[in-house]
Amino acid sequence: MSTFKITIDGRQVDAEPGMTVLQAAKKAGIFIPSLCAHDELDPYGACRLCVVEIDGMRGTPTSCTTPAAEGMVVRTTSEQLETQRRRTIELMMSSHPSPCLVCDSRADCENEKKTPTRATSATRCGACSNRPGCELRKIALGSYSRDIGLPMIYDPSKVERDDPFIDKDHNLCVLCGRCFRVCEKIHSKPAISIANRGKKAKISAAFGRSWSSEECLFCGACIDACPTGCLTDRWGKWFGEPDKTVESRCAMCPKHCKIMLRIKDGKVVSAGMAALNKESAICPIGRFALPQMVNSPRRLRKIAVRRGREQVPVPPEVAVERLFEILSQNSGKILVISNAGATYESRKAMRAISGVFGGKLVEMPLDSDASDLPADIAADLAAGNYSAVFSYGDYVSEEAAQKIGHLAIFDVMKTPAQKFAEVVLPISAFAETSGTLAAPDGSKMAVPAAVASSGDQRPLNGYLCDLCKKLGVDVKKYDFDLEPLPADFKSPTEDKKALPRRVLGHFLADYVPDLGLLGLPHSPKWHEKAAAKASGGFEILENKMLVPNFHELTVKAPEAAKFARPGQFAILMANSDSERSPFTLVDWNAEEGWVKFIIEEVGRSSAEIGALQKGDRLAVLSGPLGTPLDLGRFKEGSKALLLGGCYGIAAIYPIARELKKAGVRTVCAIEASSSYMLYYKDKLASVCDELIVSTRDGSEGRRGGCINVMEERGAEFDEIVAIGCVFMMKQCASKAPADGRDMFCSLNPIMVDGTGMCGACRVTVGGETKFACVDGPFFRLDKVDFGELGKRRSAYRLIEIEAMPRHLNGKCYRG
Amino acid sequence: MSEEKVRKIKASGLPRMKMPEQDPVRRASNFEEVPYGISLEMAMDEASRCLQCPKPRCKAACPVNINIPQFVAEISKGDPKAAAEKLKTQTALPAVCGRVCPQESQCEGSCVLGIRGEPVAIGALERFAADYVRLNNLEKAPEKAAPTGKRVAIIGCGPAGITAAADLAIAGHEVEIFEALHLPGGVLMYGIPQFRLPKEIVSHEVESLKKLGVKIHLNYIVGKLRTLESLLEDGFDAVFLGSGAGLPMFLGIPGENSVGVFSANEFLTRFNLMKAYDFPEHGTTPIRAKHIITVGGGNVAMDSSRTALRVGAKSTIVYRRALEQMPARKEEIHHAQQEGVEFQMLTNPKRVIAGEDGRVVALECVRMELGEPDASGRRSPVEIKGSEFQIPCDVVVVAIGNRPNPLIPMTSPNLKTTKKGTIECDPETLQTSIPQVFAGGDVVSGAATVISAMGQAKIAARSINRFLRGEPLKDAPAAV
C-alpha cells in the first residue's frame, strides 16, 4: 500500500489510503481532541471536538470523518477552532457534572483526597469512579473548560442500578455513541441505542426496559468503550486504574475465550476483551463473574489435615505425605473425581494417581454439580463404598463425606463438606494458575498465570506433581488427547441461555448474585442471607434524598431528641453487622421524639444507612455524643459566621437556630460543588441574618467556597464556626484572621465507640492529642493538625474498596 | 494441715489434671476457644484431690468469697448441677470466671496442695460446672425475694454491672441496666477475645439476667442522655455505677498519632465486638499488617498479641520490664509463647516512625535494665543509654492500661473523683459522695480484673440493699 503525504500544522506527515485525517494526525503524534472517535469503531462524527480547518474545504470538517487525501493542508488549531471546541465542551459540561473541572481548588482538593468519594451518584469528578480514566476530563483539563456560561443540568433520576453488573449514570453521558456502536459491531443487532432527543436523550434498551430483559448479553464491551463514567462495572469500578493488563484465557467454560485481566495491587479487579470486535466477545461469566469468584471472601485459604478430631493447618509437604498414605493404604477402593475444566497437566496427574492404585476415575464436566455424578458412583458414595475419595471441587455431599474413611478435597472455595475431610487443599483459581487448556480444535494452548495465589493456595497440579513424584508414577504414560469443542457447542457469548451455571460443583450465582438476575440458578441449599435486620432498633420515619448522595434521615429516638444539643453527633449502625459510624445531629424535636441526620454517601456504611426506607429500622443510634458547642460564649448582639460545606450545611443549622434565639447576628455561608448540590437554603435563611451561597463552579451564588468568604469577611465576626470536609475546614483555617479570635471547627474522624473508649478519633490540636468524640467534636480551627487528620481519616481507603461491591439497587446484599 | 496428710494425698497418685487444648498451630489462625473443657470423669477425679480444708484458704483468697470446697465436693460426688447451683448463689458469672480469673494468684495460688505439689484446678472445675448446666439446660433461675418496690439503675453492663444487677434483682428490687454500647457484656464483649471467652457464654449470662427481670437499655449513654442525678429524679432509689475503665492510656511518644497506632481497646473492639475478622461480611474494617507490635505486659497485651497472630501477622510484645514481672496471667503468657508471639523484654518504645503517607513503618525502642525496686515493689526499669534500635512494623498496639472514662463524672458535678479519675467512695460500703450512688469495678479501682470488679459489685449491692432498707451501711463493730 502506498503512503502519501499530508500537511498538518505545517508538518509533512505520512498517511495511508483509507485513513482519516484524525488517524493520520494521531499516527504522527499530533493531538486533536476527540471523544466519539475510537480506534476500533467506524467514524461517527458526533462530538465535533476534532474539528479542523482544511485548505480548500468549507467550514470546519470533523477530522474523524474526513478521509486523508494526498496533499491536504490541515490546521488543528486556530482561534475559530478553539472557540468552537470550547463551545462544544461547554455544551457537554452543561449536562455533565463538572464542577471539579472548573473549581479553582481542584488540584489541592484532589491531592487531599487521593481517591474519589465512593458515592452512588457521580455528581462531580471527586465522586466518580472513572476519575482516573475519564477521557472527557483529560480533554477538559486541557484548557477548554474554565468558564461555563450555560446553566448546569443535573437529573438525579438518571442514575440506574437495576441491571446486573452495570451501573448507569446517564448524567455523565456525552452521547458519543461509542456504547451502542460497539454493541452493534459485536452483536450485529444492538441491544441499546439512543432514546429520545434533545436534553432527554439517553442510552437505553428498547422502550426503556431493563437491559437484562432485552437482547443485552452483558459482554460489557460498552463499559470498555465508554469514555466517561456513564457505564461502569459495579463490582470493580472503585479499584482505580489497573497496574497492568495481562492476556489470559477464561477457564469458566470449555470455549476458553481470550480475556484481558486487569491487575491492581496483585488482584484481578476486572476483565475485558482483547479487542472490541465480534471474534473477541466474552460473556458476563468471563467479564464479571471471574473477578468476583477469584476475589470471593469465601475462597479456601488454608491447607488442613485431620489430626484426631481436629483439622490442623499444615505445610503442603505434610498434606502431600498424608495423600500418599491414603492412596497407599486404600488401593483398589479409591474414587478420584477429576474435572474436565482442570488444566491438561492436572487431569493427566489425576488419571495417573487413580490408575496406579486401581481407583475409579470420573471426570466431571466443568459445568456440573454433585447431582450430575454418574448414578452408580453416586450410589456407591452414598453407601460409603469407597474407603478413599479424592475430589476436585464440591462433588461430595456433607452426608456422603461423613461416610468416607479418607476424604481429600481440593477446592477453590470453602464448602460445608470440607469439615468432614481428612485433607483439605486450597487450589489456585483460574487466573492464578498456569497450564495447558484445550483450544477449540483440541490442540494444546498454554495459559500463563495472571496473578499470584494468596494464603496456602497452590495450583492443583502443584500438589499432584509432588504426589506423583512420591508415588514414582510416570505421568507421561497417561497422556491423552484433549477434546475439541463439540460441534453443537453453544457459546455463552451469543446466548444468555448457554451461560455456564456451575464451576467445580459450585453454583456461580451463589457467589455472584447478579447472575441470579440473568436467570442463573442457585444451589438447592442456597438461601439468600438476608441482611441482619435488627428487630429492635430505631424506626426510620423518613428518608429524603435532598440532593444526590445526601439523605435526610428522620429517626424516632425520643430519648436522644430530648437531650440533643447543637453540635452533637450520634453513632449509627444500619444493621447489627455494620460498622459504627458517627453522624452529626442536624435537627430534633423533643415533643415529637425524632432526630434528623444528613447521611452523605461516602462508602459502604453510609450507603447502607442511606438505603434505609421509611418503616425500616436502624439497628443502632447511640447518642447524643460529643461536647455540644458552648453557646454561652456567643454574646447577644455579637456577630457570628457559620461556614458549612457538605454535611456541614445542615450541621450549622441547629447552631444558627440557637444563636438566633440568643440574639446573635448570624451570617451563614454555605458552599457546594454546584447548584444541584445545595440544600437547606430556605431552612438556613429562616434562622440567620444573612445567607451567603457559594458554588465551586459558579452555577449559583458566588463562585468559590467558604474559603473566599472567610478571607474577605472573616475579620468582621466575633465568633466563627466552620463545619465540612477536612479540605474545606483546612482551607478556611488557611485564610482565617490570625489575631487569635475564637474560631471553631467540628471534626469528624474515624470513630468506633464514640464514647472515649478506643481512641480511634485521636486528633492533634495545638500539639496535644485529643479525642474528638469526647473532647470534641469542636476544636479551635487555627490549632488543628489537618494534615494528620486527613491521613488518619483515609487509613482504610484501600481496604474499604473491598466492601463497596456489595450494593445492588443501593441495597446491601450478600454474595 | 499436717505434712503427713499432704504426703498421703500425693501418694494417692492423682496428678493435677491437664486441660485438653486446641493445637497451638491450628488455634493461632482461628478465633475458637483454646481449651476444650473436660469430661465429668476428669472433673470428678480432679475434684477428689481437694482436701476439703476446714478453714479453706482458697475461699479467703477469692475476691467474691466463693465457698470453693463446697462446690468442689459436689463435683467429686458427681453432681455438677448441685455444684453450679452452689456457685450461682455466690457468683453471677461462673462460666466467665472459670475462664478469665487469675486463679494462680487467687484461689489456686493459696491452695494447700500447691505448697508441695500442684493445686486443685479450681478454675477448670468452676468452668466445668457452669458449662455442664448450661450445655445440658439444667439451670434454674435463683429464687427472687418478694418485690420491694424499690428501683435501682445500674450503669454499665460489664462484669460489675451484671453482678450487682443479679444480686439486687434477687433481693427483690426492680433493676434497669444502662449500657453505652450496642451489645451487653462490657469488657467481656469488646475486650476479651473469643478464643479466651466465647461470646455465646456472655450472651447466655446476660439472658439469665433478663430472666431475673432485669431490663437492659442498650445504646444508652448516661451523662449524655439522662445524668446520674436525673436518674434519681426520675424515680430510681439508688444507682450502681459500674462504667469501667474505658479511657485508653497512650505512651505519649512522638509519632503516636500515625496511621497504624491503636489503643488495645480499639484493636480488640474491632475484632471482638465488631467482628472485623469477618470483613466484609461485617462492615468494620480489619487491621491488616505484616508485623504487629503490642506494647505492654498485662492480660490485654496478651489478648492483643494473640489476636494479631490470628489476623495473620507476625506478632511481637514489647515490654519494659522482665518476663517474670509481667502482670498477665501465667496461662496467657504461656499460650502466647506457645502460639508464636515473640517477646522483646526490657524494651521501651521511644518513638513511632511513619512514612510520608503517615503510616507506621517502625517502632524505635531502647533497651532497659532493672534498677531499684519502685513503689509497686517491682524493680523499676532503667534505660540503657545509647541502646536505641528500630523494629520494622506496620501496626503498633498500645496496651499499657486504661483510666476510668470521665463521661459520667464530667456530667455529675456532685460526684467526687480522685486524682487518678476514679470515683471516690467509702472503701467499706462503696458509697460515693452522692449518698444514693454506689460504685464498683474498674471505675473505682482503675483497670483491674473481672473478678475483682465482681467482688466490689457484690459489696456495693449489699450496701445498696441496706441503704434501701434504711439500715446502717456498715456492719456493727464486733463486740469486744
Image: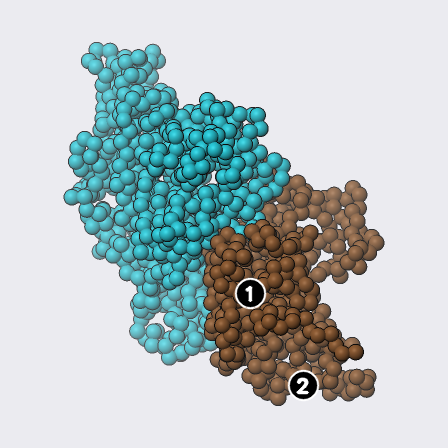
Q: Position of residue B330 (x, y in %)?
A: 69, 66
Q: Position of residue A582 (x, y in %)?
A: 46, 47
Q: Are marks 2 and 1 on the same chain?
A: yes
Q: Which chain is brown?
A: B
Q: Residue furthest toward the right? A: B372
> Observer-nearest residue: A570 or B392?
A570
> Observer-nearest residue: B381 or A184?
B381
Q: Which chain is cyan?
A: A
Q: Position of residue A193 (x, y in %)?
A: 19, 38
Q: Chain of mark 2?
A: B
Query: How would you rate the neighbour count of disc 1 (Cα within 10 Å): few for under 14, some for 14-19, many for 20 or more?
Result: many
Q: For the point 21% across and 32% down, which residue is it? A: A199
Separation (CA) of disc 2 from disc 1: 44 Å
> Observer-nearest residue: A293 or B212?
B212
Judged from the image, the secondary structure of the residue bearing numbered disc 1 is strand
Q: Which residue is mark 1?
A: B238
Q: Residue furthest toward the front? A: B470
Assign the N terminus of chain B to one quadrant of the image.
bottom right
Colour mode? by chain
The earlier-in-sequence mark between 2 and 1 is 2
- Horizontal placement of B296 versus A815: left or right? right
Q: For the point 38% across and 49% down, which residue is it? A: A589
Residue type of the residue flagged with mark 1: Ala
Query: How would you rate the neighbour count of disc 2 (Cα within 10 Å): few for under 14, some for 14-19, many for 20 or more?
Result: some
- Horizontal placement of B190 versus A36: left or right? right
Q: Which residue is mark 2?
A: B48
